[in-house]
Image (tube, coloured by chain):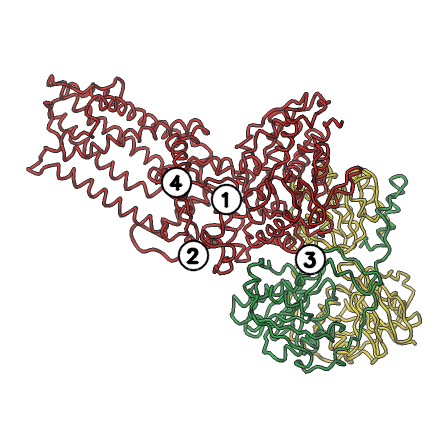
Amino acid sequence: MSKEIFAYIEHHDGVLDDSALELINAAKKIDESANVVALVFGTGDNLNKACEEAAKTYNTVWKIDKADLAYPNAELIRPMLVNILPKGSVCLVPHDTFGIDLAPGLSVKMDVPYIPDVVGIDKVEGDKIVAIRQEFSGQVHTHVETDMANGIVITIRPGTFEPDESKGASGEIVDKSADAGDVEAKRKFIEVKEAEAGDVDITQADILVSVGRGIGEEENIELAEELAEALGGVVSCSRPVVDAKWLDHSRQVGTSGKTVKPKVYIAVGISGAFQHVAGIKGNPFIVAINTNPKAPIFQVADVGVVEDCIEFLPVLTEKVKEMK
Amino acid sequence: MEMALTPVAKVTILGIPLSLFAVLIPLIGISAFCYIMARRLIPLAKAQPDPRFDRPKQRLKYVLKFWLGQYKQPRYLVAGVIHIVIFAGFLILSIRSTSLVIEGFKPHFVFPGLGGFLGDVYNFLKDYAATFVLIACIVAGIRRGIFTPERYKVPPKYGKDHTFEAIFVLGLIGTLMIFESLYSASIVAAQKQQGLHAEFLPPLTLSWIFAKMLGGTSKGFLQFINTTSYFIHDSVFFFFLCFLPFGKHFHVITSIFNVFFAKLDRGTVKPVKYGVTEEELDNLPYFGVKYLEDFTWKNILDFYTCVDCGRCADVCPANAAGRPLIPRFLTIKAREYIFDRFPVLGEIKPKEPLIGTIYEEDEIWSCTTCGSCEEECPVLNEYINKIVDLRRGMVDEGMVPQTLQKPLNALAKRGNPYGKMEKKRAEWTKSLEDIDVKIIGKKAQAETLYFVDSATSYDERANEIARAVVKILNACGEDFGILGKAEKDSGHEVRRFGEEMLFLTLRDQNIDAILNSGCKRIVTADPHAYNALKKDYDGIPPVEHISEYILRKINEGKLRFKPIEDPNLVFTYHDPCYLGRHNLIYDAPRKVLDAIPGLKRVEMERHKDRSFCCGGGGLMLFYEPPEEEQRMGQIRVKMANEAGANAIVVCCPFCLTHLEDGVKTTGFEGKIQVMDLTELIVKQLIIE
Amino acid sequence: MEILVCVKRVPDPAENEIEINSDGTDIERDDLVYSVNEWDNYAVEEAIQIKDKVGGSVTVVTVGDEEADEVLRREMAMGADKGIHINDETLEETDGLGVAKALKAVVEKGNYDLILTGAQADDGAAQVGGMLAALLDLPYASLVNYIEIIDDNTLKIGREIEGGNQEISEIKLPCVLSIQTGINEPRYVGIRGIRKVAGVEIPEMELSDLGLSEDEVAPRVKRLDYFIPEMGEGAEILEGDMEEVAEKLVELLKAKGGIK
């Protein structure tokens, strides 16, 4: 089998989303030899910029330029995709807030199966595909199987496939705007309201640097902030830190605080009481940094560092910055 | 006896006998008073039933102790002494004032029995009483008006300051004292002028001073003073009587009833509705207090009786921590609302839900039910039952903070607030190396049941208490067991959080399990479980708290201790609310501590019945008040530090975790240690 | 406004430790406790609040076995007016699309202005709402955390997007919205509330009542098994001096998507 696989490329004002480079590897996992086509929607310079960027990774880039797509509206993009995708297409979409909006309806409109939130491709045999999903916040995994002879829509969980950083392609950009047709939607985008500064929603963060009493003093929270900034995450905490009024209650993880579902959780100076750990869901990769090797947090952590966090954090932050 | 002055009853002005006014004033006064009181009784009549006529002997004792004896007053010394003086003065002068009223139309009236020697004694007393009351009023007025103690202040959101009313009433009382004395003094002065027999005036009393002052004045002037004083006293007296039911001085009338009908059983919570059995609960249209009329008549009487003394607020840990709850205003707001909805003149206004009108949700959730307000109240007002009833109403409406919904749902499904699996309830026993803890039920039985409860079963830190209890029971050779997964949460907090149906479910499951175990007695280390088993459960074997058990075993010679090794340790004992105030177990834990050789122990200023709540048990672990300046645990740790202690001994899993958190967040880590009594006992135990 | 809310009975992950049975065909269900899917509960609360504001009625529907009745009753105790229980053995094996088709049939039997679902379920995939909208040809928005009624035909809605930001749109009624947690504060439902609706009749429907055939709801996507990926005991402690440890940790973090 060798069919075209389409990857829906997200971009933010012309800057590609991380998922853009991951989808190609997910596609290769389905069919090594497939020609993976990038689908890029938008308008104007931002769109051109995104297409050029995508062409460094994808051999074919379909550009769909529509004035009302300055902000991506799934209700507009869905019918356009139905118009341009050939029958039998495999369509990959990142499983993020946009993909969740777009993909289920897309599969219905294309009349193809839908596998959501895939974290791995187990095998492909002919038209049969077996993918790996998670249930119960990652507590268990499942294999799911379907027939993709007539095409399929799959959403890929961001961060689960390696990004293709090679930039080895010099793809052709094809303007498919006309084929996409003129569509109207009954849902009109108005604006994006930015989250208020300081009003960080730790429940939505993928990366949490969580501080506990071991951080010692209020000033040291700055160290965690710096690490979080370098990682692209946010700072959360355990109860004693809130009790000490070093951080707002909205940052607290645990039974009396928030339940979080990050991908990576770095517990800094947190002993790991049940009340705290119970607030961590979704089976994240947990790093524990604590001076006490017997702290219960090491029982639940994947990786442990037995160091004084006040000394260790600046070193780690420096290394992260070097890496980027 | 020959009289120099014409008695008021015989004075006429322009041919009109003044006795007419002396009859009219009391007539109008008493009629107005009766009408006002009738209006004030309307809310009581509309309120819910509450059978408070049982145990009359005990109630009478309460009246003698708390009303006549003013037992609670000296807990705040200055205010207490002033109040006792005024109260005693009032009692004495009430006879004089009444006879004075009658004298206005019945000359030379004397109450039967007060004519002779007894009368002389009485007059002697009442003259001093009036004098002391006046002095007390002046001192109280200066204190209230100039050096206002913190607890009398009214935060802006609770309306205007109450100082004016307080001073005004002190002024009225002072006026009564002055004119009563002037009245007597003018008669004595006139008698003396005429060389007639004059009543003896005790030296340095008001009357005595006035009589000296009036000694040189004319008879006409004395007659004028006499008549005028009489009518001023008469008018003010009846004005005062009718004024009482309009504010905090209503207690002058209601406190005796309030004390008589006071709650007699500590630690208990009233049923959803008196007269409705548990089986009939489903028929009720709703639970708890949503409208004023849902309170019991005794609750309304409480509102009327509040003296606004602020003692409840002063001792309230929620208030101290900066939570949005001040017990005093829970009452004052209700009283003002009652006066507004049920005015003396005009129509009764329609009812509205109390939450959102006078109370806020968080205000009602802020209470830990520690009971310190009730302990302090001089007129024995209740708060916990009202709070629980208001919560029942909120639970019925679904108004439960999200942070509390999770534990409540978990309790319904798993029997513990953490949502942990039932089969893990006895996991803590696994790390006990050489002791095998029996799980008792239908198959295996034991003499003594150790009721563990949720926190001790599931909280890792509190697990240590469970293991310590097992070691102690084992050392005493006790035949004991636990219920394992058959045990559910005792439901103690569930009930006090207003979720009565869930409580009843948990209780019934536990009673079944306890009876199935065939145990002869129950021991528990959790005061909340202890209180629940003792007060909220029926038909189960007797319950003992572990501190009582340990004391018993020490006395039997079964437990002996090594001396404390560290000479620098200074211990202090923190009374858990549900062991101390709610169950009066103050001494057993202290005696146990004192049985450990070399143990140095100090008391915190707030100890025994004044103990300061750690932050509350059970579901309070999960409640996050929107406003809070400090945690109660932190405040408590600072109190221990001030007492010079560096080791806090508690007797409750919640106190243990709250105070340990308090130590960690106040910079006392490594300086103050917190331990449960059972942990200390195991540490010092000599194993034979 | 006539509102339909689709709800589901799921094992409550907060109160369960999910384990897999010996042959990997299912999770161990004996010790599980079930409740209404958390997101669905927010959806029902939102529906009730809308009803309280503008009038109308709230109907809750579920696809599930006998025991799914309990979540309908719970939501009715909250304030939903009616319940509809789709109970057909065939649907136990179906996929998200099959559920969406069954719900579509229910929607078409009524006259709803607004259809709400939870944004996702712990044992689901955030798909039914979007599929249902597509099947009905209605406008759709997912992850909705704000609803404001503009007029009889229009809602202003907010979608929760990355970074805690909120995407504001206008959407025409009738429409399908999937509701994100945090849109409101769902009220508490105690044992007493549920008891009060214990006697209420809830109509049960089978495939035939919905005019669907078994073939139409045959799953396209099948779950083959459950498994737990291998995990080590406790944390792997990184050794070395601080620099080395930091370098190792950065590598690991990068691999796990911990660097953005």
Q: Please state if A26 lies on the left or on the right of A270 as rendered.
A: right
How far from the left and from the top, in percent, is residue B171?
A: 30, 33
Report the mark closest to the observer, 2 or 4.
4
Q: Please state if B416 lies on the left or on the right of B38 as rendered.
A: right
Q: Answer yes or no: is residue B359 visible.
A: yes
Q: Are marks 1 and 4 in contact (CB under 8 Å)?
A: no
Q: Residues within 10 Å of mark 4 (few under 14, many from 20)?
A: many
Report the mark closest to the observer, 2 or 1.
1
Instruction: Report the quarter where the C terminus of chain C lies.
Output: bottom right
The type of residue carrying mark 1 is Ile
The residue closer to the viewer here, B558 or B223, is B558
Q: Are marks 4 and 3 in contact (CB under 8 Å)?
A: no
Q: Are marks 2 and 4 in contact (CB under 8 Å)?
A: no
CA gap, disc 1 and disc 3:
41 Å
- The residue labelled by disc 3 is C164
CA gap, disc 4 and disc 3:
55 Å
Q: Residues within 10 Å of mark 1 (few under 14, many from 20)?
A: many
- The residue labelled by disc 1 is B384
Report the mark closest to the observer, 1 or 3.
1
How far from the left and from the top, in percent, is residue A189?
A: 66, 69
The type of residue carrying mark 4 is Asn
Q: Which of the labelled discs sits on residue A145, or is there none?
A: none
